[in-house]
Image: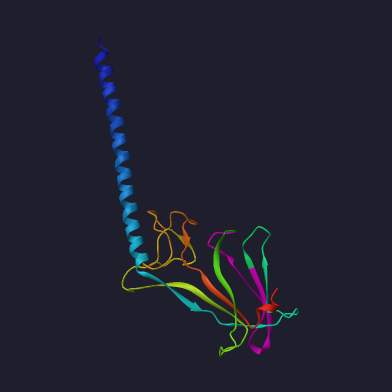
């Protein structure tokens, strides 16, 4: 008979603790959600103030290979869509060196033994007989980013990386409601390097 009030107080105390724990969890989730939305808003503003620009690498002049062609295209495997283009270039002082470009390129990151894979946009183009420059060559335009308004925050990451947010209003990308850095390999690649192999005659290519 005398234990009933004690049990009731113990039960009420347990309910109070449970309600306080739930309230703390809800408050934590609300604060976390607000921080996420605030960060996403900042990321969207930075991406909207960013544009993609292309910077030209030094042109690589091609020389004929021993089989009479200017390049050889090979796939990584029977089931892989990745293509590598091997060629020979002539540099200053007539130094001849081998070169290669590939549709997928691996670049090291800050982590040991870890690499990110980026896609390249590679095309082979026949030199028009009326073009002023008839030199067989490889031209590469590297994509990079710069702010639209230098006084405002902009995207400063690797433009080759994959992200969920668009760069600028007219650039390719996805518009999912997630932060661009939430998934390291999610979304679409923000931009690709443009590589063009100029050759005088396509009939002799392998």
Q: How many marks?
A: 0
Residue 173 shown left or right of residue 110 in the figure: left
Residue most extreme to the top? 1
The x and y percentages for residue 141 are 51, 76
Horizontal side of residue 88 vs 151, given as left or right = right
Tell me if residue 165 comes above or below residue 28 in the rendering: below
Q: Nearer the viewer, residue 53 or 109?
A: 53
Residue 37: percent from left, percent from top: 32, 53
Question: Is 78 colored magenta in this rendering?
Answer: no
Quarter the C terminus occupies = bottom right
Q: Find residue 103 and report its horizontal and vertical position in percent.
A: 59, 67
At 27% from the left and 29% from the top, the residue drawn is: 16
Q: Position of residue 74 (x, y in %)?
A: 68, 67
> Is 73 on the left or on the right of 18, as rendered?
right
- Classify residue 90 by image quadrant: bottom right
Q: Is residue 161 above or below residue 2?
A: below
- 167 left or right of 67 in image: left
The answer to whether residue 27 is above or below residue 159 is above
Q: Is residue 91 magenta?
A: yes
Residue at point 39% right, 71% down?
51
Nearer to me, 171 or 179: 171
Q: Residue at x 41, y 67 (%)?
A: 171
The front one of 84 and 18 is 84
- Camera-side residue of 113 and 41: 41
Q: Main secondary structure of the magenta part?
A: strand
Where does the N terminus fall, quadrant-wise? Answer: top left
Residue at the spot 56% in from the left edge and 62% down from the top edge: 117
The structure's colour scheme is: rainbow
Write the start and end of the magenta stretch as one range: 84-112
């Amino acid at each position: 008979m005398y234990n009933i009030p004690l049990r009731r107080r113990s039960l009420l105390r347990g309910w109070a603790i449970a309600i306080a724990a739930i309230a703390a969890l809800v408050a934590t989730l609300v604060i976390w959600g607000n921080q996420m939305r605030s960060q996403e808003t900042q990321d969207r503003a930075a991406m909207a103030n960013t544009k993609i620009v292309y910077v030209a690498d030094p042109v690589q002049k091609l020389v004929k290979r021993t089989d009479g062609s200017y390049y050889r295209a090979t796939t990584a495997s029977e089931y892989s869509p990745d293509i590598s283009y091997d060629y020979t270039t002539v540099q200053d002082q007539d130094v001849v060196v081998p070169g290669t470009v590939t549709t997928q390129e691996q670049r090291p990151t800050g982590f040991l033994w870890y690499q990110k894979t980026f896609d390249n946009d590679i095309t082979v183009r026949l030199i028009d007989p009326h073009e002023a420059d008839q030199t067989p060559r490889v031209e590469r335009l590297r994509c990079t980013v710069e702010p639209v308004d230098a006084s405002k925050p902009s995207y400063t990451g690797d433009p080759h990386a994959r992200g969920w947010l668009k760069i600028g209003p007219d650039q390719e990308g996805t518009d999912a409601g997630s932060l661009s850095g939430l998934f390291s390999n999610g979304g679409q690649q923000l931009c690709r390097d443009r590589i063009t192999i100029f050759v005088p005659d396509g009939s002799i290519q392998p």
